[in-house]
Amino acid sequence: MNRTRFLLLVAALGITSGCAFTPQVVQIQPELDIAKSNIGGGAVVAVYVVDERDNKELGRRGTGAMKGAAITTEQDMATVFSDAIVAGLKDKGFEASAASSAAAPGHGALLRIDIRNIEYETSMGFWTGGVHVRGSMKGTASKSGESYDNFYQIDDEKRVVVVPGADSNAQMINATVSAVIQEMFNDVELFEFLKN
């Protein structure tokens, strides 16, 4: 590598690493791939979401070698998940609504979602750094004294040469949140339970 290219690379790393010390607030907007259908047949489903994460911080910006500023969101994650899941259930033909408590509805099913983890983390490699974004949640469906539960998780890693900027961070976090909710919508057994 010639001297000019080396200096340009060092300058680029210096500029982007400065972003690591600027706090970031992410807007979470899950995007699901759900084909409209009538598979739910109008079955009633109440959706109750609990954010069980110990730390509401999503992660820290940085290079892996050093931790930078916090990545947070001002949104209520339980509401974000609930809105996305209710909309997805409606697209599948269910009569879905958000529940204000975990009490079983008078009729129909209760789908309880426990958000366990949404985490952004960086690591340092020899030539590149790693960005790891993880998400997990537990889904428990219950009706008429019966229940079905499953655990959904996503663990995504990207190798990067420079510290990701705010747009890249937001994109990766949103992709992980979307993917973990999508995992639930890909659970055939869950939907067999809810519609019967």
Image (spheres, rainbow, N blue to C red):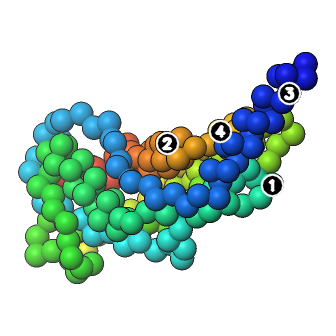
Does 112 sit left or right of 38 as displayed? right
Say whether disc 3 or disc 1 marks the residue closer to the N-terminus. 3
Of 120 and 168, nearer the camera is: 168
Query: Measuring 80% from the left and 54% from the top, which residue is drawn there?
Result: 65
Residue at the outermost right position: 2
Q: Residues within 10 Å of mark 3 (few under 14, many from 20)?
A: few
Residue at the outermost top position: 2
Does 129 sit left or right of 37 as displayed? right
Quarter that holds the C terminus: bottom left
Decide: is 144 above or below 64: below
Q: Which residue is mark 3?
A: 6
Q: Which residue is mark 4?
A: 158
Check disc 3 and give the amino acid type. Answer: Phe
Tell me the SS state at disc 2: helix
Tell me the SS state at disc 1: loop
Q: Which residue is mark 2?
A: 167
